[in-house]
Amino acid sequence: MTSSPHLPRVLRTAATIAIAIALLASTGADALASQQGDGAPRKTRTVRRTATKRPAAKPTARRPVAAPLNTSWTSPRGKVALEADINDMLSRRVKGGKFGVMIVSLSRGDTLFAQNAGEMMQPASTMKLFSTAVALDRFGPEYKFSTDVLRDGTVGPDGTVQGNLYLRADGDPAMSARFFKDANLPMSTLARSVAAAGVKRVTGDLIYDASAFDDRRIPEGWKTTYLGSAYAARVSALSLNENLVWVVVSPAGKVAQVTLDPVTTTIPLRSKVRIVGGAGGRISARRASDGGIDVSGTIGSLSGPRRYSLVVDDPAHFTAGALAAGLQTAGVAVSGTVRAGRVPSTATKVASFASPPLSQIVSEMNRESINIVAELLYRDAGRAAAADGMSSAEVAQANLRDFLSKKVGADPQSVRIFDGSGLSTLDYLTPRTMIHLLSYAHKGPWSSAFHGSLPVAGESELLRRRMRGTPAEGNLHAKTGTTDVVVALGGYVTAKDGEIVAFSFIYNGNDRWNAKATMDAMGATLANFVRE
């Protein structure tokens, strides 16, 4: 049975409390408040997920939904009733802060509700909707990034390259264990391809070229408390394993075996780990001033492998070291060092490693809210517009504003963006601009990939515990956004009569749990809405 404003006040209050308690039991992967200051990465970063496309939302017959015992959504009939219900939800549940809300019917083209729709507000991870759109619009859903190895010298009959090898970045965000079961696979595959091309020895250096992006690895507006955590990995055009490295400690007889995953030659590893009895262990892994990692502590002789994650300070150097390790394993000797440089225009391509299709990348990014993927895609989309081919947060913002102005039909000054993930505290945009974007994305040629990238209420990823047992379950699909001062939700829902509705809910303030409960109630109410 759905609740309504006409229920006794005590029942409405009980319903609100019940939803708040349920929300406290779940934390989204993009919720920073519970992670700030915690250097341990999320477990989801080591799990391989297979992304599947979901079709764009269309008016379809929906299965009956069993209502939960305590709910706070309503059953409005007509626009006036909907406005009254949404106003009531916004006014009586949240203490302090500010809501920005805009709800539009994509089927009829009219605005169903707006409050502070033109106010500049922090979007948190709903910023990823914009990064998704500019990337899909620039490249198309089937686009694949290519990370290449090139040479500048000739190859002799004995397989010797008289010159250097180059590792050229293409801003690929998918070279990780999330997309490939083994984090070592991208660089080891490239190395084997180099060997298969007949290369056995290189007289010069292994030079990495990450000049597709500028050198700024930490976007403006990222808090220092973020920087030891996996969700705030450094930004580089040459990135591997989401710019995280795992220290793996295992007992090996009377000694402790300490390795890095992925393997790399450019991070010195020093171990003072001792073997003790039993299956326990206490390990400390710390970054040293020389860029190396110092590992100490104890591990039980009966213990299984123990893994500890650290954020990589110099992703490009780290990734090139992984290729160097792969070349060693593949039997390719490099006489020189691993260093930064530029690929000469006369260099010859030797091998390439392709990413999964962009549609799969954005699907994984939005469903799990992966910040580093968003950062790379945001900059990738702007590269074509960069005068020197080098993208940056500034170039990416100019590209986004151009996209909004020329294609979306939104005010380009209604966004002020310093990163692609929404982690920056300096990011601001309006709910109205988000609605413009959602409307454009819904009808664009890449609409299916955009829709399919979004979590589904009550079923998948960041929305799997939200709006269960309501009309929104299995229906509403949207991107979440959460920091310690932001809760946001933007996406689509099909109303009870088949009408397609786009919505943008943004809350800036401290009463985040009640704000999230309010958003869930509004989402379910939109799913239960019927025109008179």
Image (cartoon, helix red, strand yellow):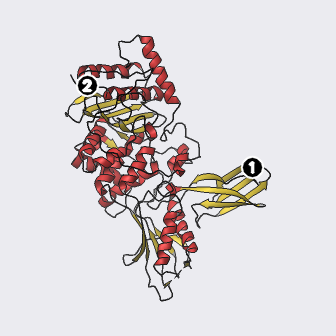
Q: What element carries label 2?
A: loop
Residue drawn at 73 percent across, 49 percent down: 281
Whole-number angstrom distance, CA of label 1 to CA of label 2: 61 Å
**Residue lying farthest top?**
8
Residue drawn at 48 percent across, 89 percent down: 157
Q: Quadrant of the C terminus?
A: top left
Q: Which amino acid does label 1 sit on?
A: Ala
**Residue lying farthest right?**
277
Question: Do we see residue 293 in this rendering?
Answer: yes
**Residue lying farthest bottom?**
157
Is 165 left or right of 345, judged from the image as shown?
right
Question: At which x and y percent is residue 7?
Answer: 38, 12
Q: Is residue 336 above or below residue 116?
A: below
Q: Is residue 390 above or below residue 71?
A: below
Residue drawn at 54 percent across, 78 percent down: 332
> Which mark, by number, is residue 217?
none
Q: What residue type is labelled 2?
A: Val
Viewer-proximal residue among 179 and 413 = 179
Q: Is residue 330 above or below residue 394?
A: below
**Sequence-earlier tag: 1 or 2:** 1
Question: At which x and y percent is residue 208?
Answer: 47, 69
Question: Do we see residue 420 in this rendering?
Answer: no
Q: Mark 1 points at which residue?
A: 279
Q: Name the residue under label 2.
A: 530
